[in-house]
Image (tube, rainbow, N blue to C red):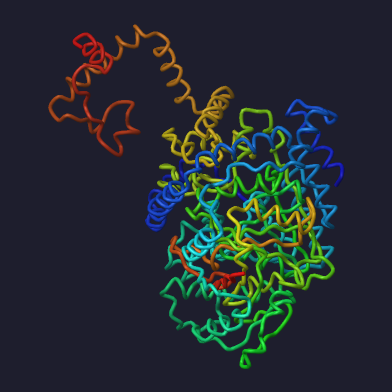
Amino acid sequence: MSDARTAILARMRASLGQRAEDTARRAAVADRLQRAPRGVIPARGQLDPAARTELFCKMAEAVQASVARVASAAAVPGEVCAYLKTHNLPARVRMGADARLAAMPWAGQPHLEVASGRAEGSDLATVSHALGGVAETGTLVLTAGTDNPTTLNFLPEHHIAVVRESDLVGDYESIWDRLRQIHGKGVMPRTVNMITGPSRSADIEQTLLLGAHGPRALHIIVVAD
Amino acid sequence: MHITSPAFKDNARAALDDDALQRALGNVRSGFIGKRAKAAAALPEFEQLRDAARDIKDHVLAHLDLYLEAYADKVEASGGHVHWAQSAEDARRIILGICEAKKARTVTKGKSMITEEIGLNAFLEEHAVTPVETDLGEYIIQLRGEHPSHIIAPAVHVNKDQVEEDFRRVHTHLDPARNLEEPTTLLSEARAVLRDKYFQADIGITGANFLVAETGSSIIVTNEGNGDLTQILPKTHIVVASVEKVVPTLEDMSQIMRVLARSATGQDMSVYTTLSTGPKRPEDPDGPEDYHVVLLDNGRSAMLGSEFQEMLRCIRCGACMNHCPVYHAVGGHAYGWVYPGPMGAVLTPSLIGVDQAGHLPNASTFCGRCESVCPMRIPLPKMMRHWREREFSRNLNPAAARYGLGLWAFFAKRPAVYHAAMRLAIGTLSRLGRRSGRFASLPFAGGWTRFRDLPAPQGPTFQAQWAKQRKSA
């Protein structure tokens, strides 16, 4: 369909009164793509680390996520078990190959069964490790891969997401900077998920209901480090 | 889909007499407006962000050809395929071609207005491919054989008891005696039924809220998570997006994202904002093996450089219809095609022709609320006026309206004659209506008096009162 491409682009140039070889326009586009200027950044998230964590937790809870703060990574398996117990869930979770998760003392929870790999439709609870969180709106950011398969974020009834306090940022733009550091400018993992609370729908008479197609509950464990 | 825009007046009359619809429309009036106002007020930078969002899109539209080239190169560099569709028919053929190549029988769909615009579902069904809508609202209207009546709340015209009836009619494998009184039960039932479909589907089709030129990513914004299940479980993911969805960078997307959900549902951020780039990497345990983007023009390139270019800034949030008194009264179906409300009144004539959709720009009170809430600051009333001018210049409106406007123009251009005529008319009406203070019927005013009385003028004309007050002040 390269003919269609040529035709569409030619029609656009004709409508705009421009020619393809216009170097000034090309330079303007290349410059913006290269510089990626930040626009208006809300003051809301621009806080010192302690206040930023507070805001992240507050905003996440405002959108019906539950939040637990733990003192260290070693406390995560215990918190996961406590969450499952509180919600009358079987002591079983699934998680990916994330090294940060793998380093946690899961063996200290003898009753907990830990399955690995991508989610199955039958998984009730999964654990994934977030790349970071955005305090501005209580948004988690997770990236695809063997470490944290994307299906873990969407198929279970309960999604437990672990995020390090030092990975919380004030705004989305700081996350894009981090992604560029990791993957290179202009390169992305297959999927980047920004998740703000558990799944919901208001499609029946505009009444808000939780648990539409994704998880009914989102539990965030914020790890001090 | 069958276009009924030319019958707007009949559609509107039927809508006003439809009790169930009127009950459902109450939810639009009561819900959206307050939520948006609250979210906007909670962010001090909201108005500044609207300016920034407008400026970004204006910059993109002035360089649209170049950003599309940059975007397409990036998609291909990440292993995806880009297909360019000049028309709705081209887009349908391209998508069917992919379905045939993959021997697909079932496709799941995330919510996409573009696939409504190209009439994809009916076309796939004609070719033995079964489309399954997975957004709850879209699923409901697919069961009902209807089209969306709102761009973000497609089933806003449907009441709960109607959903219950539809589920009982279609989900015949379930116990007929089950209790479906609570909306949560309806939601759980849809969740369970659709869960199987995600796993059965050969292809997942989504729309896109943004396309990012910097990275070649397509972005969907949803609350349910259906779009994500649609695009990570099947082996093939097809994105269908119109050309104006492209933005330069992740930063630019973030600016617009900050006004999108707040304007749409009054959320600070929708639950799921997902950036997808190419097919899954070889080592990824999940995600699609094939990633296709269908870029649709369908008349948009002709809007560039015209008085309707600014309409291409639209991000489909629905705020204009949520705040529109005409939409509140008649709902979305009366508009007769895919896009209702003020944005539909401007866009529909651009895409299907003013001869088909000329009524829509007339269905406006010009109250200006749409423009005042549009996150992209699109001058919707101004553009509706452009359409009215075009309709008039092409003799598309009825003779009575043309003669009436001609007569009005004659007086409006001659102030002395106008004042004299008004003095005469107001004086006469005021004397005739002195006893009851109103008219139940009047010659040439049947359109008004059929539904309500016309109040009799009180005292002299406004101009006369104004002159008198200025003199005495």
Query: How many marks can you see?
Result: 0
- Taking A14 as reference, is B251 above or below it? below
As drawn, the residue found furthest toward the bottom would be A110
- The residue sitting at 65% across, 66% down in the picture is B132
- The residue sitting at 53% across, 39% down in the picture is B48
Q: Quarter of the image containing the C terminus of chain B?
A: top left
Indicate the quadrant where residue A71 lies.
Answer: bottom right
Q: Position of residue B303 (x, y in %)?
A: 67, 33
Q: Nearer the viewer, residue A66 or B148?
A: A66
Q: Position of residue B186 (x, y in %)?
A: 48, 73
Q: Position of residue B268 (x, y in %)?
A: 51, 54
On the question of residue B333 being in view, the answer is no
Indicate the quadrant where residue A170 lies.
Answer: bottom right
Indicate the quadrant where residue A74 lies.
Answer: bottom right
- Taking B339 as reference, is B392 above or below it? above
- The residue sitting at 45% across, 20% down in the picture is B405
Q: Nearer the viewer, residue B293 or B372?
A: B372
Q: Nearer the viewer, residue B27 or B409?
A: B27
On the question of residue A40 being in view, the answer is yes
